[in-house]
Amino acid sequence: MPSEPRKILVRAPNWVGDVVMATPALRALRAGFPHARICVAVREGLEPLLEGSPRIDEIVILRNDRKGPSARLREAAALRSRRFDLGLALPDSFSAALFLRMAGVRHAVGYARDGRRFLLHRAVSLPGEAKGRPMLAREHHVLGLVEAIGVRSLGTSLELFVTPAESRAVERLLRERGVEAGARLAVLAPGASYGDSKRWPVGRFAAVGDLLARAGATVLWVGSPSEAPLLRQAMAAMQSPSHALGSELGLGGLKALLERSRLLVCNDAGARHVAVAFGTPCVMMIGPTSLAKTSENLERVRVLAADVECRPCYLRTCPIDHRCMTRIEIERVAAAALPALRDDAEICWRGGADLDGVRTTARAGSPGGGS
């Protein structure tokens, strides 16, 4: 590996939460190679998460409308003329390593997984889980790659940055919806792309929304474009007024919104990690999955779960009665969320796991080197 790479290509993860949990690695990489040009290749639609970051110099967008795997390889081959000295495959997939090789990266680094060792110049041995120890949190997993090339970790705290354009767009959207400046914003995200099994019942979300509204919050519903019917259902179930922002927001707008919000209530989905990056209090209901890979940075997250024998099952659709989610009561979620609306919330509100069913140790992220 070159001691001072001039051009670095990072193949970013493919999901919202995983991209956010990769930000400690990007921070460390920038500090380790301050004079290198760092380019991040990321799936189309996720690039707003990285906009405004001083840790990177360029974002390459990998289009979603490609026609078969060969189109993705052509995207990689188009980067060959850039002559990257170093490449990091943050996803553990075969395709991520192949992307780096097709891009002509001179020294490709990644974990030795998915039969891809022969594609990597440096195949890093798996940490933790490969040696019989507990699974590492995702932040530590990706940091292991940059540490393997001699870069020192600057901590696991997450970071995102809001651009002036993103901030102005959210201000305009809130103004158009009649939301007063300085309102106490409570953001509710009832969706989860993983599957229905991850979703707390939408009627219960609405009931919590009513309790927050009665406590003086302005309730805002957010979700992906495909979740628009779910947001309409949630609004209709509320007795108090609320606003659905949905597809008008985008991920850039979600950053700007959560940065200025008092609270996020959500399922185990990507929005949680965006809130964490801004230190916004978050109440999260977790059902079929576990915290094993996402147990870091919980100092501002209240994790609620039900103690049922069948969880975690990791099924996308529950074959029985969805008890892991339906046994999380409305009152319990409201009791966790309401203190975040108080004027002294910075002092009184603390995260952590409600251990009624959360079968992993909740940890706070270690301090990072960036804002």
Image (cartoon, rainbow, N blue to C red):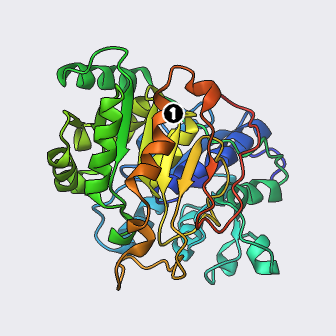
Residue 58, horizontal then vertical, whole percent: 52, 39
Residue at 52% across, 31% down: 161
Q: Nearer the viewer, residue 83 or 249?
A: 249
Amino acid on which the number 1 mark rests in the picture = Pro
SS of the residue at dot 1? helix
Q: Residue at x 30, y 32 (%)?
A: 213
The reply to whether residue 32 is in sight is yes
Residue 369 vertical placement versus 19 (above, below): above
Measured from the top left, where is residue 108 in percent x and y?
68, 63
The quarter of the displayed image where residue 325 is located: bottom left
Residue where numbered disc 1 is placed: 339
For this view, does 298 lie left or right of residue 264?
A: right
Q: Is 39 situated left or right of 123 in this image?
A: left
Work out which quarter of the rendered image holds the C terminus and state it.
Answer: top right
Which residue is more in the foreground, 47 or 137? 137
Looking at the picture, how far across and down is residue 182, in whole percent?
37, 15
Question: As drawn, which residue projects farthest toward the front?
Answer: 331
Would residue 1 be found to the left or right of residue 288 on screen?
right
Q: In the visual, does 116 lie left or right of 317?
A: right
Give the x, y percent position of residue 24: 68, 45
Residue closer to the observer: 98 or 196: 196
Residue 54 against residue 211 in the figure, above or below: above
Nearer to me, 257 or 199: 199
